[in-house]
Image (tube, rainbow, N blue to C red):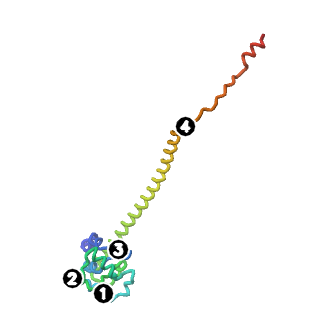
Amino acid sequence: MSTAEIAPVALVESRILVIRAHKVLLDSDLATLYQVETGALNRAVRRNIDRFPEDFMFQLSPGELESLRCQIGISNETRGGRRFRPYAFTEQGIAMLSGVLTSKRAVEVNVAIMRTFVRLRQLLATHEELAHRLDQLEWRQNEQDGRVQYVFETIQQLIKAPEPEPLPVEPKRSIGFPTSQLVSSAE
């Protein structure tokens, strides 16, 4: 069975959230993917808490939890839902889980999740490169538009400008000897 069948990329991508400027997966979503209970996953993490610094895993604040309840429908504890605020695992925290959860399924799911994060980073890099190229094209287009606008304005000014008065034309001097002098000197 391939890792794509164990944890389909689309399923993993749909569970990734952005919290505190980190792409994270919640403990309950990871437990579902690993096919273990959320409590069992959290107990394994607490037994190895020194492996999970704040940038690998953090517990959601009450405000963040309320926001998630509104956005994605996490159940209320008053209706039989979670009694504890969920933990959010960053990519590094999920990688660290592979050392804590040693079942074959956990290792395969971690490989699938890591591939998903890599794919998302590649997509983001591609989008950033495209955005940069679009910015360059827009800048060049604006520069060209400015030049074309200048040419049109200059042409408009030339069309609207009054005709210049012609310069006075001096009579042309004739070249050679004046014929009147030649006739009088021959006599």
Which tag is nearer the camera, tag 3 or tag 4? 4
Callout 3: SS = strand
Q: Residues within 10 Å of mark 2 (few under 14, many from 20)?
A: few
Q: Mark 1 or mark 3, which has the lower sequence index?
A: 3
Residue under numbered circle 3: 18
**How far apart in space, not on screen, are marks 1 and 4 (Cα)?**
89 Å
Mark 1 against mark 3, which lies toward the viewer?
Answer: 3
Q: Where's residue 18, x and y in %?
A: 34, 74
Secondary structure category for the residue under label 4? loop
Q: Nearer the viewer, residue 4 or 127?
A: 127
Question: Mark on residue 44?
Answer: 1
Q: Earlier in the sequence, mark 1 or mark 4?
A: 1
Q: Are marks 2 and 1 in contact (CB under 8 Å)?
A: no
Callout 1: helix, strand or loop? helix
First of labels 2, 1 by sequence position: 1
Q: How many labels sit on residues?
A: 4
What number is the disc on residue 79? 2
Residue furthest to the left? 79
> Which residue position holds label 4?
162
